[in-house]
Image (tube, rainbow, N blue to C red):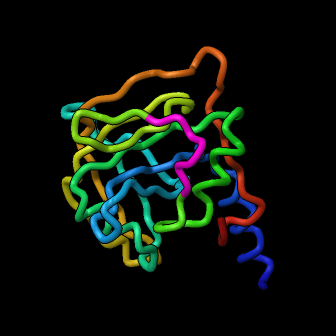
Amino acid sequence: MSDIKEQIGLSLGRIPSGLFIVTFHNNELNEPDGMLMSWIQQCSFDPPMISVAIKKDRKGLELIKESKYFVVNVMGKENAKMIGSFYKGVGKAKFEGIDTSETENKIQYLSEAVSYLECEFQSSADTTGDHVQIFGKVLGGNLLNSAQNEPSIHLRKNGYDY
């Protein structure tokens, strides 16, 4: 790796991101599903909207579009075990032993998360890189455990990999 590329990678890795579990209905399996994500950002005040960057080859990209609704669960420092359950990816997520509730649009959210946002898929944009940006209109949400569970902040060692 060239010196400049290595320097860029180290610098990119210092951009903080959160840790989130995005949940949705998997129409193929006809059950709740979810995946661990880190690149999520508010992108509009009125209406409130968020953007989510998803790697192009991840199955969850199409499943979220098909589901129409998804939930962003803000994970906290106390949620390490729960995060591990969703690390395996779509179709392999385990809700067993995890306390959940359902949004108005029948999407599971994680009751032990710091907070959650229920979103309606609006559109997507190809970034010309290796990720697609999806945009969701925030329909609802709530603080759940913010007093005792601080949001998890993630820094990467190298900006070229998760």
Question: Is residue 104 shown above or below 34?
Answer: above
Task: Where is residue 87? Give x, y as percent.
Answer: 62, 60
Task: Where is residue 11? Give x, y as percent.
Answer: 71, 59
Question: Is residue 146 shown above or below 122?
Answer: above
Q: Which residues are magenta?
A: 94-100
Rendered image quadrant of residue 159? bottom right
Task: Where is residue 99? Give x, y as percent.
Answer: 53, 35
Camera-nearest residue between 160 and 2: 160
Queried whether the magenta region covers residue 62, the answer comes back as: no
Queried whether the magenta region covers residue 96, the answer comes back as: yes
Q: In the current view of this chain or complex, which residue is farthest to the top?
A: 147
Q: In the current view of this chain or complex, which residue is farthest to the bottom?
A: 1
Task: Where is residue 128? Give x, y as percent.
Answer: 38, 78
Rendered image quadrant of residue 103? top left
Camera-nearest residue between 142 and 102: 102
Left/right of residue 41 with respect to residue 95 in the rendered view: left
Camera-nearest residue between 5 and 131: 131
Question: Is residue 35 shown above or below 101?
Answer: below
Which quarter of the image is occupied by the C terminus?
bottom right
